[in-house]
Every structure is written in C-alpha cells, then in structure tokens.
Image (tube, grey):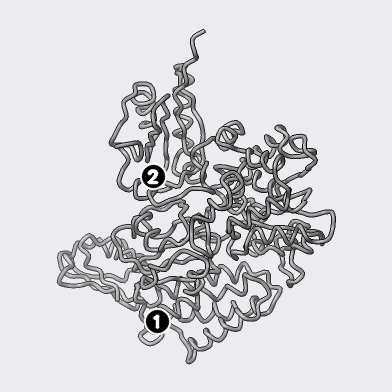
Amino acid sequence: MPKEREPVILRVGLGSCGTAAGGLKVYEELKAAIERDSLPVELKKTGCIGLCYEEPLVNVLRPGEEVYTYGHVTPERAITILREHALGGKPIPEWLVAGGAHTSPSTAAFLGKQRRIALRNCGQIDPESLSEYEARGGYAALRRVLTDMTPDAVIEEVLASGLRGRGGAGFPTGLKWKFTRQAAGQLKYLVCNADEGDPGAFMDRSVLEGDPHSVIEGMLIAAYAIGASAGYIYVRAEYPLAVKRLSIALDQARSAGYLGERILGFPFSFNLEIKQGAGAFVCGEETALLASIEGRRGMPRLKPPFPANSGLWQKPTCINNVETFANVPWIILNGGAAFAALGTPKSKGTKVFALAGKIARGGLVEVPMGIPLREVIFDIGGGIRGGKKFKAVQLGGPSGGCIPESLLDTPVDYESITATGAIMGSGGMVVMDEDTCMVDMARFFLDFVQKESCGKCIACRLGTKRMLEILERITRGERREGDLETLEELASRVKETALCGLGQTAPNPVLTTLRYFRHEYEAHIRDKKCPAHHCQALLTFRINPEVCTGCGLCARVCPAGAITGERRQPHAIDPEKCIRCRSCYEACRFHAIQID
C-alpha cells in the first residue's frame, strides 16, 4: 500500500495573549473553512511562543518544509494563508514574521539571543496533546530516573546543574531537595508555587498554558528524589486557561500511568492535584501558600522551622515554582553539566523574563544568565516604543526595584541585580520611558503591596500605609517638612522588621527611586512640579499664543469650560477652572497646549 501522505498543519497561537488579540476568531474561521470544504489540513492549537507583540500568530507546516509564522493574522488573512500557502505552497512574504529568508529583522533580533530550556516546547506543541509532548522527549527523563537513577543520584545531578529557584529567592534547588529528603518522617509533600501575582509578570502562566506536562514531569522527578507521595500545584484562579490545560494534562498523565500508584510499574507512587488560590499576593510567600492549601487564611509565619522540615500539615514539604520544575526534565536528559555551562559561575542556566511596559517588542523571552540588561531591553525587546527615551526598568515586581539607564550594563544574575537594590524576582521586567514619573511609580507599587499586605505584622500593616501616605502627599504637592527623611527611615525599618518576604521587600521601589531619582522627589517637593508631566495636581496647562490658530477645538472638548477666546484668535486657559484632565492637550492638532 502507498504511504499515507502527511497532512498540512496549521497552528494557531492560543495562549492568553493570542486569544486576547483575536486568535480564537482566527481559529474558528479556519476550522469552519476546513470542515466546510473537507480540506486536507490539520488545525491545531498551541501556546505562546513569546512573540506577544505579533499576535495573533499562525504557523504553516507543510511536509518536508520549514515552519512559517504569520503575525497580526485576521480571520480574513487566515483564509488567504490557508488557500495560498497551506494548500497552494506559496508563502505570503508581506505577512510573514518568521520562515527562512522571510524572517523579519525584528523577529530575528527577538529570537537570536535567546536559549530556550524552560520554554522549549511553548508554541511548538499542542498543550492539550500528551502524544505531542512525548514526541519531543516528554516523560523520557522520568523513565530514565525510575530505571537508572537513585533519589540521591537525581539530587546530585540537580546540584551539579547549579539550578537555583526561579521564584525569586534563588535558593539552590538541589540543596532544598536534599534537605527535604533528609528530614525525618515518612509522609512528605511537594508543592508547585504557580501563584504569579506581580503586575506585568506572565512567565508561569505561559508555561502552564503552553507546556503543562513539563511541569508535571519535573514535579514527578522531584517527588521521586525527596520521597514525596502527594503534591499540589497552587495556581491562581485568575488563570482559567492555565487551570484548564493543567487539568487536562493531569488527567492524561494519570491515564497513561505517569501519575498514581506504581508509576510505570515501578515502586514509586505519587498523586498530584490543583489547588486554586483566590488571588492574594501574599500567598506567593511559601508559608502563606501552605496555610491557604490547608484551608486557613493565607498569612505567613515565622521561620524556622522551614517547610523542608515542617511544612504542609507539619510534614516535610518542598516548594519550587513553575519555571524551576520545567527545567528539571531537560537537566536529567542533557546532564547537569550542560545546564551549568550556561550563565555565570554563581547564576547558572537560563532565565525567563516577561517584557512589559513601554517596550517596543513586549513578550516572553528566555536568555542565558549573565546577559546585560541593555541587550534584553534594546537588542531583544527593541528598545522604547515610539522612539521615546529609556528611563528605568522595574525588576522583581512590587518587591523589586527601579534600575536606571546608568546601570543598563548590569549582568542579569542574582548577585548583580541585588547589588542595584532590586531583586531578580520571578522574572517580570516593566520598562519605563521619559513620561514615567518615578515618584508615582513608587506610589503605585507601594499602593499595591499595602493593599495586599495580610496585616499580621505591624511593620508591614502600618509601615507601608504611612509610607504610602507620604508618597501620595508628595504627588499632590502637599509635602511636609522632613517627608523624605521620614520616608527613608520608615523604609529601612519596614525592611528590617517585617515578618515575611513581602514586607521585607515592599520598600524596594521606594528605596531605589530615592537612590537613583532623588531629583524627581525634590522637584515635586521644592518646585511643586512633576518633571515627567504626570502627576495631575502639579501640572499647569497653558496655550502658546504664537502657535494657537483659534480653531476652538480645545474649548469644545474642555469639560470645565476653562478655555475662552474668539474664533481665529489665540485662546487662553483659566487656571482656576482647569481640572487638568488633558482633554485639550490630546485634542489640539497644532501642539499649542503646553504643560508646565
């Protein structure tokens, strides 16, 4: 019999980013056309490949040919791609973002310096297909571990890799596993921290949406190494797509014998379930997370004892995050030395970052540790959107700090980033341009942390509130004598005395902005001016009579009736009536409105 011809495959990116950009409409349009005409095309879903700024994305895979990727695909374009390229074999260069000679310079720059380990399957497989994961080596690491390695040998391999926890603290993963294995007691637990709460962070979500089996396999290997028989994936309920795909993957793993009793016929049993969190930022702290799993209010406790000795229900418990577990199967298959060959002597391997904010090419990237921040932001991320000037990057979320332009050559590793006053965190990078007010940025992050504080310790409950009150006064131009000195003292006290990591790192955005952008604080206080023209209470709007044409558009859009003037004559703004809403500034076509 003649060999059956391989089908043409169309893959649509349907992570949260792709879906939000309209990818589901593209998928439904393609599905309807393929079914209506019985076309020899297989339609598949995939997760985020990282090119979020190009979504919706569609891949064309013709037998024996390379993968072609189309960006900004509309339902109408999708049908053209289906007819002309998928069926006709003729690529459409003007819509392509990747594919041989047709790869755009921006895509080449975005992908060129990356090294994908944790993200190795994201955007490459259907996350709801176990067979596609297995076809790319999925669960081979688990088989190797159960067949050829002792638990101690697994731990030694992870130690040799130099893998450090990717959740923010950077504690050596193998050492944490070793402590849990050595802890007294027969019953032990394993927990995956997928409670990703930093504004602008979406690393864990994308991995769970695009490659859930890699996390499950990493957890299975960890459970075997530490002697755990049960585990939980603690994921926030605001990630419905991640929860859905993770649930499908767990059911598939159980049916295939990868989860449950006597896994793959070996004397190793492990059960795993999902625990959905209610979105409390403090539950990203490990002891608060454990309290939440136990059904109690998510509040941190004093350490020691550490979870490795007394964690979930007072039993030894190992906690790692999504990215950490996703690296483990690769390390087992390729060897710890291969992972350790990447990065720096103290920060080995790769790190996933979410590029967000005022950056030209926002998305998900995975780079070797030690790469300078400048290369991540400008070479990979394309610099600042709209040609504006770079001002700072917030690294580490609300618990991190603002790194200025003068430190852009700082290597991305735990020690170097900490030396700037920021922290690596889980991997969120929020880029800011010249229009960002650093005082207001500190206020924003402190407002977030203050609202998310569990209130257990006075330092965090009241310290962050008093700091926030000072920042709010400064942005309103209502400063008091000694505000900056009080702010600095409060920040230092909270950092030194708060109970958990949330409180201890909450002052970081304040301390780093004071350290690198003190002149902006002083301008707010001394001159009652916001250099970035952002803080509404400190702005003065006026019309330049030499530029104003008297068209009257500004007066028509002003909701306060603060603008007057004769037609074809320069207009004026009454400062007493002006509510500083920016309506006139945004409406003026002649740039006659000036902000002081």
Q: Where residue 519 sits in the image (x, y, percent)?
A: 38, 82
Q: Which residue is mark 2?
A: 54
Marks 2 and 1: CB-CB under 8 Å? no
Q: Which mark is residue 297?
A: none
Residue at image position (70%, 60%) is: 289
In this rendering, would 493 be left or right of 224? left
Q: Which residue is mark 1?
A: 524
Image quadrant where one finds the C terminus:
bottom left
Residue 54 to residue 297: above or below? above
Q: Is residue 272 visible?
A: yes
Label total for image: 2
In this rendering, would 508 be left or right of 222? left
Label 1: element kind: helix
Amino acid type assigned to the residue bearing label 2 in the image: Glu
Residue at image position (48%, 48%) is: 116
Residue 486 to residue 373: above or below? below
Q: Residues within 10 Å of mark 2 (few under 14, many from 20)?
A: some
Q: Where residue 489 sits in the image (x, y, percent)?
A: 55, 86
Q: Nearer the viewer, residue 485 or 577?
A: 485
Amino acid type assigned to the residue bearing label 1 in the image: His
